[in-house]
């Protein structure tokens, strides 16, 4: 009886976590659109008035706009993968497989996002300018996120290896 109550509680918590995570991801998308439209029009302090927001349609024709979305979209994808993981928990899918798959996908998303922020975005944007050059945008944030992505992938690799060894013993 106690085990059923605990299972029901965990499923409800997972449903709530999934809903909250999806709301956060949607808010991040809205903030991303506002931020990118303000950067395109050089608005002070990332403040966007109604006309600049409506002129966002003009900025989507610029390659810089699309190149600058590589890393944020990767990070937001990681948030949606986390929401999917919570959804699987609420449906009662086995914990080990769900966590391993989700950790690997989240690690790949944030790792690619960091790689894009450091190497891809600056160079792709630079190559669209009249004087293209090679640029690396090393920031503490991007490097930290890249290390976390690598850590998630490595942890998943170790967990899968340990599980295989334990399955061979049993």
Image: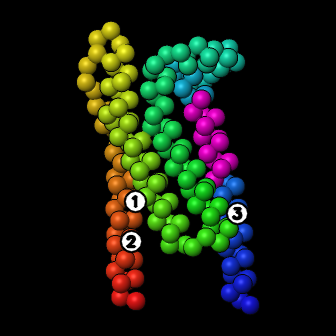
Question: Is residue 132 found inside the magenta-colored segment of the image?
Answer: no
Assess whether mark 2 and mark 1 are in contact (beta carbons under 8 angstroms): no
Assess whether mark 1 and mark 3 are in contact (beta carbons under 8 angstroms): no
**Left or right position of 95 against 51:** left
Q: Which residue is mark 3?
A: 15
Tell me which residue sits at (61%, 70%) in the image. Answer: 93
**Extent of the magenta region:** 21-33
Q: Residue 100's spot in the image, x, y percent?
A: 46, 65
Give the prevailing secondary structure in the magenta stretch.
helix
Q: How is the image coloured?
A: rainbow
The answer to whether residue 163 is visible is yes
Tell me: residue 89, above or below residue 121. Answer: below
- Which of 75/46 is in front? 75
Quarter of the image where one finds residue 3: bottom right
Name the mark on residue 87.
none
User: Alpha-carbon distance for marks 3 and 2?
Assistant: 25 Å
Q: Which residue is mark 1?
A: 152
| Badge 2 element | helix
Q: Which residue is mark 2?
A: 159
Tell me: residue 12, above or below residue 24. Answer: below
Tell which circle, 3 or 1, labels the residue nearer the N-terminal end. 3
Question: Is residue 26 found inside the magenta-colored segment of the image?
Answer: yes
Q: Residue farthest to the top?
A: 130
- Which of 96/18 is in front? 96
Tell which circle, 1 or 2, labels the residue nearer the N-terminal end. 1
Question: Pointer 2: residues within 10 angstroms few (<14), some, or many (20+)?
Answer: some
Tell me which residue sits at (65%, 50%) in the image. Answer: 22
User: Alpha-carbon distance for marks 3 and 1?
Assistant: 23 Å
User: Alpha-carbon distance for marks 1 and 2?
Assistant: 10 Å
The answer to whether residue 144 is visible is no
């Amino acid at each position: 009886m106690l085990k059923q109550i605990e299972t029901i509680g965990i499923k409800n918590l997972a449903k709530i976590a999934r809903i909250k995570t999806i709301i956060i991801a949607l808010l991040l998308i809205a903030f991303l659109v506002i931020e990118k439209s303000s950067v395109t029009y050089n608005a002070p302090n990332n403040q966007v008035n109604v006309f600049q927001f409506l002129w966002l349609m003009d900025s989507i024709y610029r390659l810089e706009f699309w190149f600058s979305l590589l890393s944020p979209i990767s990070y937001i994808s990681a948030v949606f993968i986390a929401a999917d993981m919570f959804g699987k928990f609420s449906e009662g899918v086995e914990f080990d497989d769900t966590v391993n798959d989700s950790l690997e996908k989240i690690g790949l998303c944030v790792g690619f996002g960091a790689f894009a922020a450091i190497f891809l975005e600056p160079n792709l944007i630079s190559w669209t300018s009249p004087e293209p050059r090679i640029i690396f945008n090393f920031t503490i944030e991007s490097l930290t996120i890249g290390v976390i992505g690598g850590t998630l992938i490595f942890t998943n690799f170790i967990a899968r290896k340990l599980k295989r060894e334990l399955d061979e013993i049993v």
